[in-house]
Amino acid sequence: MIRQRKTQSERKDETRKLLINSAVENFAKYGFHGVSIDKLAEYAGFSKGAFYAHFHSKEEIFLALLEQQMQLHVEKINALLTEQPSLLHFPEKMNQQSIQRREENRTWSLLNMEFLLYSMRNEEARRQWSNMILQSVKQISQSIEKLINKENLTSTLSSEEMAWTILSLENGIAIFHFISQDHIPHDLLEKSLKGIISSK
């Protein structure tokens, strides 16, 4: 049987995937500032030139990873919203998912905080990250709006403001949990979200 040679596009996609995998492993192990482009390329089995054929900088490949992580998270939140018979059931499920995510993705959360400090000093990185967040808020708010329209519910916040609140509370609670651990109430996110959702 003759093996079909990969097309140039397929080879390019494979190289990009291997570089992304290298970035996942190395950023997790050494942190954002502890990784060089040389290290990322070498770990993936490519030259520095191959890296630059796909990414212009270390920041760009990190932002690509960040975008993947954020999109996966948004998809999970939207899935939760879609699965609930009522928006009133969402806070409990969201709290459970947030706790699980915090426990499973501690390394990624630490990387986010490290990159946050970097982006506060780098306007282009901040701008790109901001655009990703805005897109996440838009997607979540659309799912919330659909549930609100189906039900006889009212809230002190708009669907967009609720989306901002979900992401802000979740990230803030995660940060304080890493610092204070069990001192922060485990159901704080649930209670906070319930407080802004009510029946007419």
Image: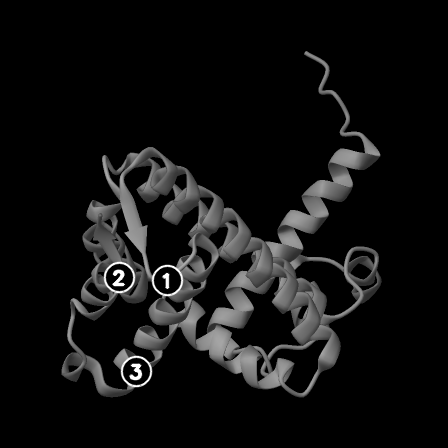
Sooner in the amino-acid sequence: mark 3 or mark 1: 1
Is 60 displayed left or right of 147 in the figure?
right
Sooner in the amino-acid sequence: mark 2 or mark 3: 3
Q: Based on the displayed image, in which of its 4 quarters is residue 92 positioned?
A: bottom left
Residue at position x 20%, y 70% in the image:
188
The picture places residue 45, in percent across and down from the top left corner, at: 68, 57
The picture places residue 185, in percent across and down from the top left corner, at: 15, 75
Are dots 2 and 1 in contact, CB under 8 Å? Answer: yes
The picture places residue 127, in percent across and down from the top left corner, at: 69, 71
Sooner in the amino-acid sequence: mark 2 or mark 1: 1
Is 31 displayed left or right of 154 in the figure?
right
> In the displayed structure, would residue 80 be above or below residue 196?
above
> In the displayed structure, would residue 141 be above or below residue 178?
above
Residue furthest to the top: 1
Number of the front mark, 3 or 1: 1
The picture places residue 3, in percent across and down from the top left corner, at: 71, 20
Kind of element beneath mark 2: helix
Q: Which mark is residue 176?
A: 3
Q: Amino acid at mark 2?
A: Leu
Residue at position x 49%, y 75% in the image:
111
Which residue is tagged 1? 166
Kind of element beneath mark 3: helix
Badge 1 crowding class, 10 Å Cα cut-off, few under 14, some 14 to 19, many 20 or more, is: many
